[in-house]
Each structure stands twice: as structure tokens, then as C-alpha cells.
Image (tube, grey):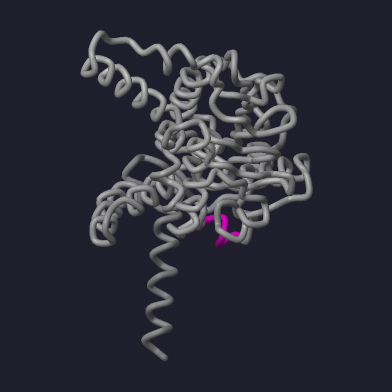
Amino acid sequence: MAAVVAASRRLRDLLTWRLTAPTHLGLNLSLRPMGSSAQDETSRTAPSEAPHHNYESLKVTAAQRHILHVQLNRPEKRNAMNKAFWREMVECFNKIAQDTDCRAVVISGAGKMFTSGIDLMDMAADILQPQGDDVARTSWYFRKLIATYQETFSVIEKCPKPVIAAIHGGCIGGGVDLITACDIRYCAQDAFFQVKEVDVGLAADVGTLQRLPRVIGNQSLVNELAFTARKMMADEALGSGLVSRVFPDKDVMLEAAFALAAEISSKSPVAVQGTKINLLYSRDHSVAEGLNYMTSWNMSMLQTQDIVKSVQAAVEKKDLKSVTFSKL
């Protein structure tokens, strides 16, 4: 018992020292009350057009502080993915990855559905009239084209900011490729999902066959969906793990998605973005490799002042949402 008390006292003394002593970064992080300005950091603001995000196929708004809302914005075409979309998604998420003010992203679809998938009419020239004057050169053309399309969704996965997909109505073909590259998936009760590619004579080639088995962990079900192109309805998507929650309608779902994004964005961006990066690394590597990577990662990240601020709030019994974290 005495050893436990002594260990507790040493831990308390260590935390007190970290909170009151000047750090090697020259920061004086004393135990002082936090002002109301910290609360303002997470206050909600009216949606407004996000600067430097002007697109033909997407609409990007600053939904709340630190939260961007990316909408697939071709409702008259059921948000079909045209040539502009494949280019603009890469541009959009490369900018988001570098946006120090953004801490979470919500992706949704405008209009009656999330997306109907590839715009076959718009893409026909690229697919049905390929460049190249022999088989080898045509194949190289297709290789480059497919790799470009794959990057459209891989850029979402590589973005260090957590991305929440909010799905209503149909999520067809390329839509499944898109959402499996996201970190969290919510859907409305009217949502359905289709790996549609076999119905148009091809194998899904931009992410579904690689990511969907890892998302739902059921190879038999993945095979069934991919071989038949049948619809998976919302309740089955929830039961299989494709989505984590189902909501009565689009409005309720979006409200929940933004609330989740706000909760995430209130946390330390050092902690959240480091967590995403290490989750993805560990998914694709052995446990030993993941632990080794984590060791290298946190040997520097543990020195962040965000830990001191979080512990200070806990010691003062303050709401962690009142903590103001610097941009990252």
C-alpha cells in the first residue's frame, strides 16, 4: 500500500513539474485559468464558401469552425463522376491536407442521392476510344488512366484529417470506392450500396476490391456483392460494419455527422492526425512493424504542448472542449 501511495505521489509531482516549469521550447505553461476565448475556438459559425475551393463538380463550405463540408455537387446528374470530378477531388483533398485550420471533413451528396457512380457518357471517349497505335501503347495509356483515377480516392485516405462520409440514397459503383477510402461512414435509412462494375463489363479498379474486404472483414459477403452487383440496404450495411450508424433521413444524418466532426475537431490535432496515420500504417503492416513505427512517431509527438494543455484541463476539472490547441 505504501508503494502505491509513493508511486501516486511521484506521478502527481511529475505532472505538476511539467505543468509549471518552463519547457525546452521556451513556453511557460503554468497552471492558469483558461479564458472564454478558448470556448470561442470551437463555436459554430454559419456555413460559408471555403476560400480557394472553386470547382465544377464539388461544393466546399466551411460548415463550422475547423470543419469543411465537401459535397458532390451535380444533383441534376445524380452526382455522376465526370472528368472534372476525377481531377477536382485530388486538387480539393491535397488542399485540405495542407489546410492548417481544417481538422475534420464531412463528405455528402447534393440532391436525391450520394452518387450514381461513373458518368459513362462523359467518360466514354477515354474508355472506348483509348490512345495508342498498338496493344502495348494502348495498355500503357490505360495503366496511366487507371492510376490517375485511383489517386482520386487514395488522396482521401492519405489526407491526415479524419473524413466522415454521410450517405443518403444510392451509393453506386465509384461511390463505394469513395466511401471505403473514408475513415467513418454514416448513412440514412434510404441508403443503398452497389458494387456495380460487373454490370458494365469490368472489375472495380479504383479501390473497392482492395478496401472493402478490410472494412467489413467478410470476404464471402464482399465476393457476393462484387460478383452480383446486388444492392446492400442500410440495415445490412450497418450489420456488416460498412457503416457505423444509420439515421432516419438525410437531415438527421448530416446533423449527426457534423456533431461527430465537431467532437473530433475539439481534440488535439497532433493526437487525432497522428492516430489516423498510425491506424492506416498498422492496417497494412504487422503488429511488430506497427509498434516500431509508433515508437518512432511518438518519440517526437509526446513532446507536444497539447499533452500539457489536456492534463492541465483535467487537473482543473475543466471541459476538454475548452482547451485551445494551436493549428497544425
Magenta segment: 312-316
Looking at the image, residue 159 lies above or below residue 4: above
Q: In terms of image quadrants, where is residue 47? A: top right
From the image, which quarter does the N terminus lie in?
A: bottom left
Looking at the image, residue 221 lies above or below residue 75: below
Q: Position of residue 248 (x, y in %)?
A: 78, 49
Q: Position of residue 80 (x, y in %)?
A: 60, 24
Side (left or right) of 59 relative to 135:
right
The answer to whether residue 34 is visible is no
Q: Position of residue 82 (x, y in %)?
A: 54, 18
The answer to whether residue 224 is visible is yes
**Main secondary structure of the magenta stretch:** helix
Task: Give the residue displayed 28% in from the left and 16% down from the top.
Answer: 138
Q: Position of residue 68 (x, y in %)?
A: 60, 30
Identify the residue at the far bottom of this view.
Answer: 1
Task: Give the residue displayed 47% in from the left and 47% down from the top.
Answer: 227
Task: Give the residue displayed 47% in from the left and 52% down from the top.
Answer: 222
Residue 28 vs residue 45, the one in the foreground: 45
